[in-house]
Amino acid sequence: MTHRHADLDAYACGVATKELINKLGLNAALVIPEGPSYEVKTFITRLGINYQGLNNCDEADLIFLVDVSTYAQLNEFRNIIGDRPVVVVDHHEVRNVVPTVSLVDPNATSCSEIIARVFREFEIEPSTEIATLLIGGVLSDSGRLSRARPETFEVLAWLLRLAGRDYREIVNAMIEEVTFSERMAKVKGLLRMRAYRAGDYIICLSNVNAYESSLADTLIKSGCDVALVVSEHDGEMRLFGRGSRRIAEKLSLAEVFNDLAKYFNGEGGGHAMAAALSIKARIDPTTVLIKALSSVEQRLGIKALRITD
């Protein structure tokens, strides 16, 4: 099972985990809460890869959670787990999930990199489609290899030989055409943005109804060191955070969001440069953002001042 609206890394790792289990002689099904992201749909359509995934699963002896660091990323799908044993495959710090078996490597670029290494350790070769998906997952979550480590290139070279595709074809399939609704959400988010200065760091706050992570990424690319974006969905408040590489030396968003989860009695997790929080209550968005700003200030030990001109 992946997190809701699986991105390319989560989907690739999920499908690969399913194939690995099948190759070991066991049955497996892939559940994708609320379906895959637009990124996944575009990628597999351009490369002619068949979609795999179910909306639910009633019977299972063992649950694999892929790219899921907190139950908040599953919504009501967490009820599927029940008392079943859980295996976690993730490159984030796991928060409120207590796995029976843990395949977690915070130093890995992606879940795709982790599961590819598992294939190699078992001396099992993934199919050409799975190898292609894993390449996409690695590229997507590593920032086109900007966060790669030596092991990443070793895995990528192995996958490229198995995929049997031109590397440029895979990269071109990842070029996203931004929809009108996403562009509109980002424009609204930029118009609502409030910026603060904490020493040499810039902290940006905003709120939208959709495409929160996309807006947060845009704010970081625009020069913000921390981007905090809040949204409300059917009585649930969601907060998304992104951080620049520069501030990651001083601040871990995973720690900030862990503090916020305790304060709001919510569920959150992530890693140093990206995190998310879910609060099952109606709270004024400004209240959530100001508390998040305060937590960042405390972690930095610097008072932030509003940038007005």
Image (cartoon, rainbow, N blue to C red):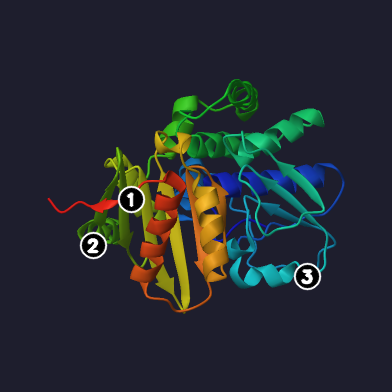
Which residue reaches farthest left? 309
Please name the amino acid that badge 3 sits on.
Answer: Gly
User: What residue is shown with label 2?
Assistant: 192
> Which numbered disc, 2 or 1, marks the residue that appears first in the sequence?
2
Which residue reaches farthest right? 25
Mark 3: give few (<14), some (14-19) or many (20+) Cα within 10 Å: few
Contact between marks 3 and 2 (CB within 8 A): the answer is: no
User: Secondary structure beneath disc 3?
Assistant: loop
Please name the amino acid that badge 1 sits on.
Answer: Lys
Q: Nearer the viewer, residue 301 or 228?
A: 301
User: What residue is shown with label 1?
Assistant: 303
Between label 3 and label 1, give the one nearer the viewer.
Answer: 1
Rounded to the nearest angstrom, the CA distance separating label 3 from label 1 is: 44 Å
> Which numbered disc, 3 or 1, marks the residue that appears first in the sequence?
3
Q: Residue at x 33, y 65 (%)?
A: 208
Please name the amino acid that badge 2 sits on.
Answer: Arg
The numbered disc on residue 82 is 3
Q: Is residue 203 above or below residue 211?
A: above
